[in-house]
Image: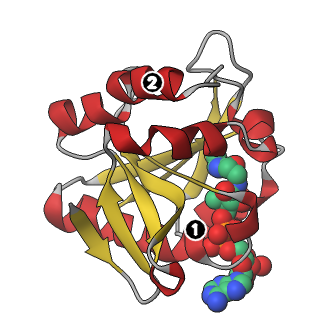
Amino acid sequence: MVVAETERLLLVKVTLDDAPFFVKLMNSPKWIRYIGDRNIRTTEDAKAHLKRTILKSYKESGYGFYKVLLKQEKNKVIGISGIVKREQLNDPDIGFGFLPKYEGKGFGYESSQAILKLARDTFKLEKISAITVAENTNSIKLIEKLGLVYQKKVKPFEEDEELLLFAKNL
Ligand SMILES: CC(C)(COP(=O)(O)OP(=O)(O)OC[C@H]1O[C@@H](n2cnc3c(N)ncnc32)[C@H](O)[C@@H]1OP(=O)(O)O)[C@@H](O)C(=O)NCCC(=O)NCCS
């Protein structure tokens, strides 16, 4: 199901059939380095992960992460972009991740702008946040380009390191 369209991209709901793509994405070097190794190695691992995370979010919140398809490459799936409400944070947060080949081409910004519009107009969210490790300069650049402003350091997940929290009123 297509939830949004931009000049170059389609944002589409994730299904269990996307599991092989998630294995690839979640084992890409920057994902492992900046988001963390979630031990997703097989299609079965990814299916279980999707049930626990994105598919659960659709059911509970109505929104979630969407796959990003590149129109000019026959709708190839190149990344994910979306919103999640985590128990550990007060406000829903925006997130994104692309296969290495598709970074640095403005797809993060283009997809996230559509996500912010959905967040405000469709899901009626009043505030959005974003979290990232301080070393992820590409992510911070994008978060700030989207108009979110640095708030404070947080440590929402026990096993992970300290993160920077950004926020913006919609
Ligand atoms: C963080 C991440 C999502 C950023 O995505 P991105 O698509 O590279 O980010 P942007 O949309 O900001 O684009 C980056 C650059 O592409 C450039 N660009 C190239 N071609 C472009 C085009 N046709 N249109 C627009 N911008 C273009 C932009 O100028 C921009 O550079 P600038 O910020 O210096 O202006 C990406 O690096 C990524 O997937 N990282 C790994 C996963 C990750 O860390 N996720 C975040 C976890 S918190």
Q: Could you give the CA–CA distance between mark 2 and mark 1, rounded to whole angstroms?
A: 23 Å
User: Could you say whether the residue bearing mark 1 is in a helix, strand or loop?
Assistant: helix
**Split into 4 quadrants, where in the image is the C terminus?**
bottom left
The residue lying toward the viewer, choosing from 15 and 167, is 15
In the visual, does 84 lie left or right of 31? Answer: left
In the visual, does 68 lie left or right of 16? Answer: right
Residue at position x 25%, y 54% in the image: 126
Assess mark 1: CB under 8 A from ligand 1?
yes
Q: Up-down: is 24 above or below 53?
A: below
In the visual, does 27 lie left or right of 122? Answer: right
Q: Which mark is residue 108?
A: 1
Q: Which residue is mark 2?
A: 49
- Viewer-side label of 2, 1: 2
Label whose residue precedes the other's in the sequence (2 or 1):
2
Q: What is the three-letter code of the residue carrying label 2?
A: His
Residue at position x 22%, y 39% in the image: 58
For the question of whether residue 170 can be seen, the reply is no
Q: Which mark is residue 159?
A: none
User: Could you say whether the residue bearing mark 2 is in a helix, strand or loop?
Assistant: helix
Q: Residues within 10 Å of mark 2 (few under 14, many from 20)?
A: some
Query: Which color scheme is applied?
Result: secondary structure
- Residue 49 place in picture, x, y as percent: 45, 24
Q: Up-down: is 7 above or below 104?
A: below
The residue lying toward the viewer, choosing from 13 and 24, is 24
- Residue 1 place in picture, x, y as percent: 20, 60
- Residue 46 place in picture, x, y as percent: 49, 28
For the question of whether residue 41 can be seen, the reply is yes
- Residue 169 place in picture, x, y as percent: 36, 59
**Residue that protrudes farthest toward the top in the picture:** 158
Q: Residue 113 occupies which quadrant of the picture? A: bottom left
